[in-house]
Amino acid sequence: MKQVSVVALFAVLLGFSCDPASAAGVTEAELLQAATELSHQYDTHYAARDADGMALVYASDGELISPAGPIVRGRAALKDYYVKRFASGARGHAIKVQEVHTMGDGGYGINQFTVTVPGPGDRPTRSTAPSSRSTVMIPTDGTWLWSPRVSR
C-alpha cells in the first residue's frame, strides 16, 4: 500500500484579495479566510488536474515536500511535479484547515488532507494525513500565496 507523506510549506491563494496596507495587521479571522480559500483553490486545481494552476497557488519560490520525499522548489519544478503526480493516478485531494496563527506579515496554518492514490494492483487507496500540513501564507501584491517563509 502506498502511503502519502507529510506535505509542507505550500504556497497560498491565487485570486484572494487582501489590502496590502493591512497585511501587517492581519487577524486570525482574515488568515483563516485566506487559508480556507487557498485550500479550496488547491483542491479545485487538483480535481481539474491543472498543473499550471497548482503551481500558481505557490509563491514564485514556493516549496513542497512531496509524498515521495524530495523537496520541490519553484513554480516550474512544482508544475512538473504535479504533471507527474496526476499521471500517477492521484485524485480526490481534500484539505481541511484545522487552525491558523498570525506571524509577521502573514501566518501559518495546520491542515489535514486526504488523497486517493494508486495502491497495489492499481486499486485506489484513500490516505489521510491528520494535522500534517503546515502552510506559510504571505500577502504578495494583494494576493495570498503559500511560501517557504513568512516575510518578504
Image (cartoon, grey):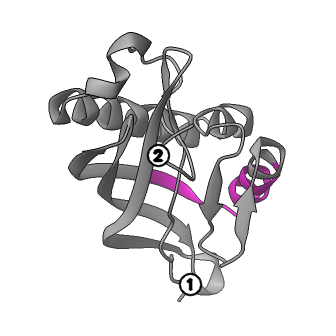
State how far apart marks 2 and 1 are (Cα).
32 Å
**Quadrant in the rendering for residue 129:** bottom left
Between circles 2 and 1, the one closer to the viewer is 2
Q: Which residue is mark 1?
A: 2
Q: Which residue is mark 2?
A: 150
Query: What residue appears at the point 26 percent right and 27 percent down from the top-left corner?
Result: 26
Secondary structure at badge 1 equals: loop
N-term mark: 2 or 1: 1
Query: What residue appears at the point 27 percent right and 33 percent down from the top-left corner?
Result: 31
Residue type at mark 1?
Lys
Q: Residues within 10 Å of mark 1 (few under 14, many from 20)?
A: some
**Quadrant in the rendering for residue 76:** top right
Magenta residues, start to end: 80-93
Q: Position of residue 60 (x, y in %)?
A: 71, 37
Query: What residue appears at the point 55 percent right and 76 percent down from the top-left corner?
Result: 123
Image check: 150 left or right of 54? left
On screen, residue 22 above or below 99: above
Question: 17 and 56: which one is in front?
Answer: 17
Question: 73 and 66: which one is in front?
Answer: 73
Contact, CB < 8 Å: mark 2 with mark 1? no
